[in-house]
Image: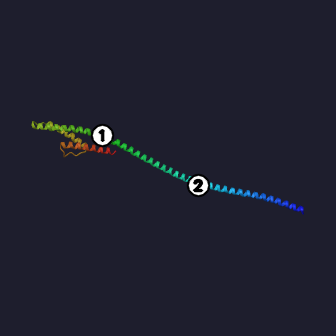
């Protein structure tokens, strides 16, 4: 009996030791589990923060992409507008050169006609003076011939200017020529001003 009791006590002690060991292991496991849970919670919080940051970065990237696309469109529109204005400037420069050339030609033509007008007007005055003088003294056929030559020159100029001077006298024809040339010169100046 004593031996059996001793064996039972030894067995109980051994079981107590195992229970204590298992209890210690269980406590350690529970502690590890709690630490793991805390770590999981921490990782989950970190994951949520990273997700929020990723969403914010994605939103910012989308905004930057939209701004970049908008800036690209605006740059393309500005380039197109610049090209259009450049084409308009080139066209207007070409027109300006053409008008300047036409204006220079018309000015030269006007100067020539003005010179011819002055000559014709002087001849007309001379013929009138000679006619008055000859009417007082004698009538010569040469005066009529000179006047006819002057009229022929004036009629040629009127024809070139496409005017109708059939109802005008010599002085009226000269004034008509002068007015026509001045009108053409004024028209050229107006066109040049709007270039």
Residue 156: which quarter of the image?
top left
User: Which residue is most to the left?
Assistant: 137
The percent coordinates of residue 194 (x first, y second) are 33, 46
The percent coordinates of residue 170 (x first, y second) are 18, 42
**Which SS class for mark 2?**
helix
Q: Residues within 10 Å of mark 1 (few under 14, many from 20)?
A: few
* Residue that appears at 12% across and 38% down: 132
Colour theme = rainbow
* Residue that appears at 26% across and 38% down: 111
Q: Residues within 10 Å of mark 2 (few under 14, many from 20)?
A: few
* Residue that appears at 48% across and 49% down: 71
Comparing 134 with 56, the one in front is: 56
The percent coordinates of residue 153 (x first, y second) are 21, 39
Say which of marks 2 and 1 sits in front. Answer: 2
The percent coordinates of residue 123 (x first, y second) are 18, 37
Comparing 13 with 90, the one in front is: 13
Q: Give me the C-alpha separation between circle 2 and circle 1.
A: 78 Å
Residue 97 placement, left or right of 10: left
Q: Are marks 2 and 1 in contact (CB under 8 Å)?
A: no
- Residue holding disc 2: 52
**How many numbered markers are drawn?**
2
**Which SS class for mark 1?**
helix
- Residue holding disc 1: 105
């Amino acid at each position: 009996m004593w031996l059996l009791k001793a064996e039972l006590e030894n067995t109980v002690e051994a079981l107590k030791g195992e229970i204590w060991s298992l209890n210690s292991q269980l406590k350690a496991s529970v502690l590890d589990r709690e630490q793991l849970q805390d770590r999981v919670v921490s990782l989950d919080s970190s994951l949520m923060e990273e997700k929020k940051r990723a969403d914010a970065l994605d939103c910012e990237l989308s905004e930057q992409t939209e701004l970049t696309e908008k800036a690209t469109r605006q740059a393309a529109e500005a380039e197109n507008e610049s090209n259009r204005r450049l084409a308009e400037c080139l066209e207007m420069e070409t027109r300006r050169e053409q008008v300047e050339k036409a204006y220079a030609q018309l000015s030269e033509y006007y100067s020539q006609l003005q010179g011819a007008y002055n000559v014709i007007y002087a001849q007309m005055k001379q013929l009138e003076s000679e006619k008055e003088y000859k009417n007082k003294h004698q009538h010569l056929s040469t005066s009529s011939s000179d006047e006819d030559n002057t009229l022929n020159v004036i009629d040629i100029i009127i024809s070139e200017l496409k005017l109708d001077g059939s109802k005008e006298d010599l002085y009226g024809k000269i004034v008509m020529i002068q007015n026509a040339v001045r009108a053409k010169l004024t028209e050229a100046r107006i066109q040049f001003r709007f270039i």
